[in-house]
Image (cartoon, rainbow, N blue to C red):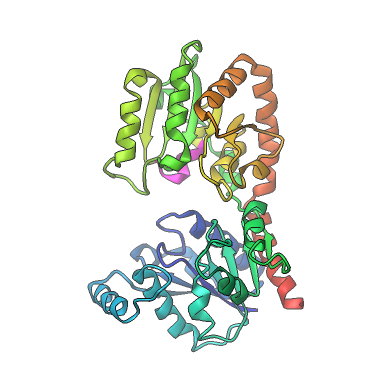
Amino acid sequence: MKIAVLTSGILPVPAVQGGAVENLVDFYLEYNDQHQLHDITVYSVWHPDVEQHPARQSGVNHYIYIKVNTLANRTRKCLFSHLHKDGYYHHSIEYFLWKAIQRIKKEHYDLIIVENRPGFVLMLKQSVMCPVVLHLHNGFLNPDTKNAQEIFDGYQHIISVSDFITAQVNSINPAIRKCSTVYNAIDLQHFYSSPSYPRERVGIVDEDFLLVYSGRLREEKGILPLIQAVKKLDTIPHLKLLIIGASGYGKGQQPSPFVLRLTAECESISSQVVFTGFIDYHDVPSYLKMADVAVVPSMWEEPFGLTVVEAMAVGLPLITTRSGGIPEICQNVATIVERDHIADNLAAAILDLYEHPEKRKQMAAASLERSKLFDKETYAKNVFAALEKLETT
């Protein structure tokens, strides 16, 4: 098939600036390059680091870049926003989509894949005749979504990242099962093979019982109740918490108001909590492997939870919450707590694992085994299998 991939209009592909969705697009493009399956053209925002990227040497994957942040294009975006006040998204995203459609209309594609922007179909259906598939990574399409039925009707099929999200989408029109699940993935071999950094790197010693949180420092991620749980556990000697991440992406960020709130919360236990700040994703496995237990205390309906898979892939016992798609990802291998009275529940789960080292050992082995379901090759194969089913219907 000749396929166009419409990215989100924020971060570039290849994922030179990171981004979970962009990395996942890279995974299936890499697989396509290896197996020569389809002729794929990716429409992405431009960034200077893409120019010499080796992925652009592929004979089957092609990249068309749209510049949106030059002075000239910022002026054009401003004009565009005045002329198109009824856009579904922010005018910068709408401008990217409009520019991409001008290029798409000059080609003849068998299929268009929209990455995580459900509303793109509203403009696409006015301009193109080929089928459009949505690859949905978040809970952006459900019965409460603006124009939900029109968007749902506009896609031939929708691929979501968890059964939790699939159920939300299918509830828009229960008579039509248009959405199916393909689980996300990580580069397992990188996580398996990365060495552990020495604990001294972050001021931790061998006798410390080390919890680790990894991810963005946002309120909905549950890091505040995790700190509150640690404060309740004064009966555990040498208890430490390693917090990997920052409020956003990239180094040199100023602390957000929420991060300042977290540091204030830690004042009475400052010797027990280590904030790493932003860590390059390549180094994350080596930091995770320092720990005894991983905690993913999400307080919102997490669509999937890549940090859950990352913790499993380094063989850590895992404590997490009953949130969105998380329970199906770590089924039967994690301690799952309820979000009501979350700090108390986390404290009880941490104490249980501290007191039962044999249980930690068993959970660690189960985590590692479960992680094998989420490798990038299986993910890419399943994405293309879902597309090939459409081709035969």
- Where is residue 196? Give x, y as percent: 51, 31
Specify whether residue 280 is painted magenta: yes
- Which one is in front, 328 or 48? 328
State the residue at coordinates (43%, 64%): 53
- Where is residue 375? Give x, y as percent: 64, 50
Specify whether residue 2 is painted magenta: no
Horizontal relation, residue 277 to residue 338: left or right? left
Which quadrant would the C terminus be assigned to in this image?
bottom right
State the residue at coordinates (43%, 71%): 88
Residue lying farthest to the front in this orientation: 144
Q: Is residue 84 visible?
A: yes
- Where is residue 281? Give x, y as percent: 45, 45
Q: Can residue 290 be seen in this view?
A: no
Q: How many marks?
A: 0
- Which one is in front, 282 or 117? 117
- Where is residue 330? Give x, y as percent: 66, 40
The residues colored magenta run: 279-285
Up-down relation of residue 58 to residue 357 (above or below): below
Which quadrant would the N terminus be assigned to in this image?
bottom right
Up-down relation of residue 251 to residue 61 (above or below): above
